[in-house]
């Protein structure tokens, strides 16, 4: 799973199926952090009915948990196992949950559209900050520098800047620079970065707040993309399955299987081997096609 502020609180979210309570407002967070996503009037499938409108209305907390970058392992070997598409593939759709692995997969598979969802509405605000920052910069290095030099953005995302006294504790700061040199990452090459940046600017990526255990939410997603003639090319699930109880496992599997319509769909998740959890390392990523791995 990605880095989260309180693991217990996150587990309770999946148990109750409800978003977290509002957090105290902070005056130093950028105005655009509070703005809901507005679709530009372009030729875009999201123009006629923004997907978020199909779900219950939610408010954006004004402070974000710091789970922007995944701590999952095997990221390079995962990307190597998933074929690279040279150009955007019309009618293909990526569906993902949680953090930046979604961006890696978008850069790799180049779908026409993407839906990134999370049960925590705070992530909606975090993605708006990332999208806004992408629109302001011209390169991947400038993007990272902007995130790590703007005090308001740092506060909103919960990342430490380049202050020497904070460097040793600036985990996400170090991770961002690390990703600039990693082949698997969307930040690892100009080509991948440019594709994701343009993808965002063209409003091809939509962010929704939903509960993966709620069959009604999943059916709304399925009905929407089927009505648009889209095909689910890839699904990223992080290690959500490890955060739900055994009674909810069957519901989780049934809901994901509802989204898998093709034997070619890539399903990416993460799971610790057996019960052997390592504190100093995240769960390994794994991939299958056409079916959700069960073990």
Image: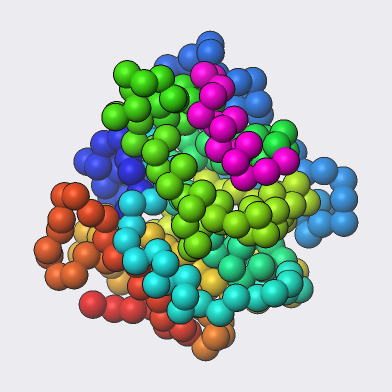
Asked if the magenta segment contains residue 90, the reply would be no
Magenta segment main secondary structure: helix
Q: Magenta span covers which residues?
A: 138-152
Q: Position of residue 220 (x, y in %)?
A: 59, 61
Q: Quadrant of residue 284?
A: bottom left
Q: Residue furthest top?
A: 27
Q: Is residue 248 visible?
A: no
The colour style of the image is: rainbow
Question: Could you say where residue 19 lies in the image, as x and y percent from the top left?
Answer: 41, 39
Relative to 64, is 48 above or below? below
In the rendered image, residue 156, in percent from the top left (x then y), is placed at 49, 25
Q: Residue at x 64, y 20 (%)?
A: 31
Q: Is residue 140 magenta?
A: yes
Residue 245, picture quadrant: bottom left
Q: Residue at x 32, y 40 (%)?
A: 4
Quadrant position of the C terminus in the picture: bottom left
Direction left: furthest residue: 276
Q: How many numbered tags mark residues here?
A: 0
Residue 45 in sight here = yes
34 up-or-down from 264: above or below:
above
In this picture, residue 169 sits left or right of residue 33: left
Asked whether 141 or 3 is in front, the reply is 141
- Give the farthest residue toward the bottom: 263
Left or right side of 13 for 157:
right
Figure check: 295 above or below 116? below
Relative vertical location of residue 244 with respect to residue 263 in this rendering, above or below: above
Query: In the visual, does 100 lie left or right of 48?
Result: left
């Amino acid at each position: 799973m990605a880095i989260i502020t309180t693991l217990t609180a996150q587990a309770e979210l999946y148990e109750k199926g409800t978003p977290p309570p509002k957090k105290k407002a902070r005056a130093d967070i950028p105005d655009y952090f509070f703005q809901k996503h507005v679709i530009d009037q372009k030729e875009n499938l999201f123009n006629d009915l923004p997907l978020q409108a199909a779900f219950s209305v939610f408010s954006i907390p004004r402070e974000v948990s710091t789970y922007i970058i995944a701590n999952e392992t095997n990221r390079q070997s995962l990307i190597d196992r998933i074929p690279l598409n040279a150009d955007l593939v019309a009618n293909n759709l990526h569906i993902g949950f949680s953090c930046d692995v979604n961006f890696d997969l978008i850069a790799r598979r180049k779908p026409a559209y993407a839906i990134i969802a999370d049960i925590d509405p705070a992530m909606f605000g975090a993605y708006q900050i990332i999208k806004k920052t992408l629109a302001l910069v011209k390169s991947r290095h400038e993007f990272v520098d902007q995130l790590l030099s703007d005090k308001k953005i740092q506060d909103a995302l919960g990342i430490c800047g380049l202050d020497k006294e904070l460097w040793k504790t600036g985990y996400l700061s170090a991770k961002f620079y690390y990703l600039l040199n990693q082949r698997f990452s969307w930040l690892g090459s100009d080509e991948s970065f440019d594709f994701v940046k343009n993808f965002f600017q063209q409003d091809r990526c939509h962010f929704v707040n939903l509960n993966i255990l709620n069959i009604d939410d999943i059916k709304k997603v399925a009905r929407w993309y089927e009505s648009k003639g889209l095909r689910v090319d890839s699904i990223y699930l992080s290690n959500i399955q490890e955060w739900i109880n055994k009674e909810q496992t069957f519901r989780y599997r049934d809901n994901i299987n509802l989204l898998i319509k093709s034997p070619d769909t890539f399903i990416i998740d993460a799971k610790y081997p057996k019960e052997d959890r390592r504190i100093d390392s995240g769960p390994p990523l794994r991939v299958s096609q056409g079916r959700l791995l069960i073990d």
